[in-house]
Amino acid sequence: MSSQPSTSTDTGRAPSAARLLAEATEISAELRKQQDDIDARGYYPEAIHRRLLDGGFYRILQPRMFGGLGTDCETYIRVIMELSRGHPASGWCYTLASSHALVLGSCFSEETQRELFGASGDFRAAYAAGPAGMPTFERKDGGYVVTGLWPFASGIPVCTHFLGGAVIPDASGALSAIVFIVPKEHFSIVPDWGGDAAMGMQGSGSNSVRLTQVFVPDRYIAPSPIARMSTESLPPEGTPGAKLHQHGLFLGLIFGWFSCEFGAILTGTARAALEEFERQLRSKPSFANPMQTRMHDAEFQRIYGEAMCRVDAAEALTLGATRIFLDQCERWTKDRTPITAEDTMRVWGTSREGCRAACDAVEMLFQTVGASVARRGERLQRYFRDVQMYRVHFQSQAFTPVLRAKAVLGLPIPPPFHR
């Protein structure tokens, strides 16, 4: 694997939402030109990383107190859509490198946030919630010495830190789910991504991370937010981050929100598929009448129109779920209105339907365009393979609607989820 991208400490003036979106459109065009090279490499190149870094894109969700742009989740979602339209895997890489500032900003103490965001505010972290096998956590001098392997750490090649998940005994001996943070100089990135290492999202930087006898101090360890679905188990002031930043976005209720991010990636992917399908409709001869292009064929028109409707629905559902989530966070900020498990699952359920609509659109276009799409390097083939990575992802699986039903019916939610 090539050397890691450099970092910037010069943030300049905070860019507006309009400027972020305009520059994201320019970066998207560059990504589209380099799709094959990025897939082979495993993550986007230094020049793209530098534009994202200098443009403030990694700071959109970061707390203002530590050099971030605040809490503009809708702009963030629109940026993801645009980058993913240029190259879905790059959108995935960017998202999973930038969004976990929320975890640091939510779950950890002011001291730790101040230390890890640093004087420059430059923080990017992949988050692999579960290890491969059984990692070792040996208690020592106010922390743990950790050894283990964490696969699918999407975005890690462009990150300054790694967030890992594990289950370890607490002081009483009971098992406790945790998240921990390690700076990049203390972990190694396994060269197991890019090229044909996976069927899709080949440029997402989803490498494994290996820790070998790494000391993780207690201040870098916090209760895991992955399975937290409500404010019920939190104190009145919420998490350390919610108390510090006085905003519900930092309650660490990320289960539904992360599904909104997937909705943005997949909506951008589906927009790219529509563009490629239209290009082929305008350029390829019709099966029925080779003297005309396929755009004059009623069946192709129907498929194209059907897919457009689904992509529009995917975007609307993703943005709608984002606004539901923000409303919940803002109500908590204003008057401490509890966020329930049902609330969280509503965000997840709405955004999941957006994900499904986007995947349906891509699959419909891929299956219709013709046999030439089977060739390696065809964009519609890439987009089809990319959406399959969501189809097999934890967030999309059939057991999750059961959680929503249980939340609405007031039935117990099984571990590891809790209210």
Image: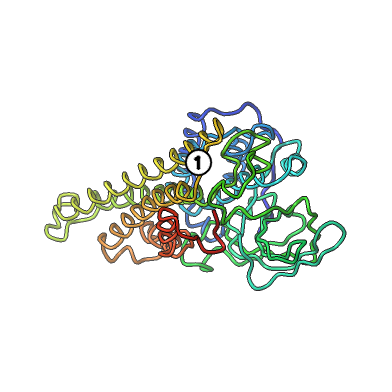
Q: Position of residue 174 (x, y in %)?
A: 70, 65
- Which of 23 and 396 lies nearest the eye of the viewer? 396
The residue depicted at 61 percent of the width and 59 percent of the height is 128
Q: Residue furthest bottom?
A: 133
Query: Where's residue 40, x and y in %?
Result: 53, 61
- Is the residue marked by circle 1 packed among few (<14), some (14-19), or many (20+) residues within 10 Å? many
* Residue 384 visible in the current orientation: yes
**Foreground pick, 101 / 34:** 101
Q: Residue furthest left?
A: 289
Please determine whether, in this image, residue 72 is positioned above or below residue 270: above
Q: Can residue 87 be seen in the rendering of this structure?
A: no
Percent x, y for residue 156? 63, 55
The answer to whether residue 363 is left or right of residue 31 is: left
Considering depth in this image, is 54 or 149 the residue closer to the camera?
149
Picture residue at 28% right of the left edge, 59% below the top: 364
Residue 50: name its quadrant. top right
Residue 324 or residue 67, whichever sits in front: 324
Secondary-structure class at tag 1 = helix
The number of callouts visible is 1
Instruction: Work out which quarter of the rendered image holds the N terminus and state it.
Output: bottom right
Outermost residue to the front: 410
> Is 301 drawn above or below residue 394 in the view shown?
above
Where is residue 101, by image quadrant? top right
The colour scheme is rainbow
State the residue at coordinates (38%, 56%): 379
Residue 176, given in percent of the width and then of the height, sits at 68, 62
Identified at 65% across, 73% down, the residue is 133
According to the picture, the residue beneath numbered tag 1 turns out to be 27
Q: Is residue 64 left or right of residue 282?
A: right
Residue 401 image-quadrant placement: bottom left
Residue type highlighted by circle 1 = Ile
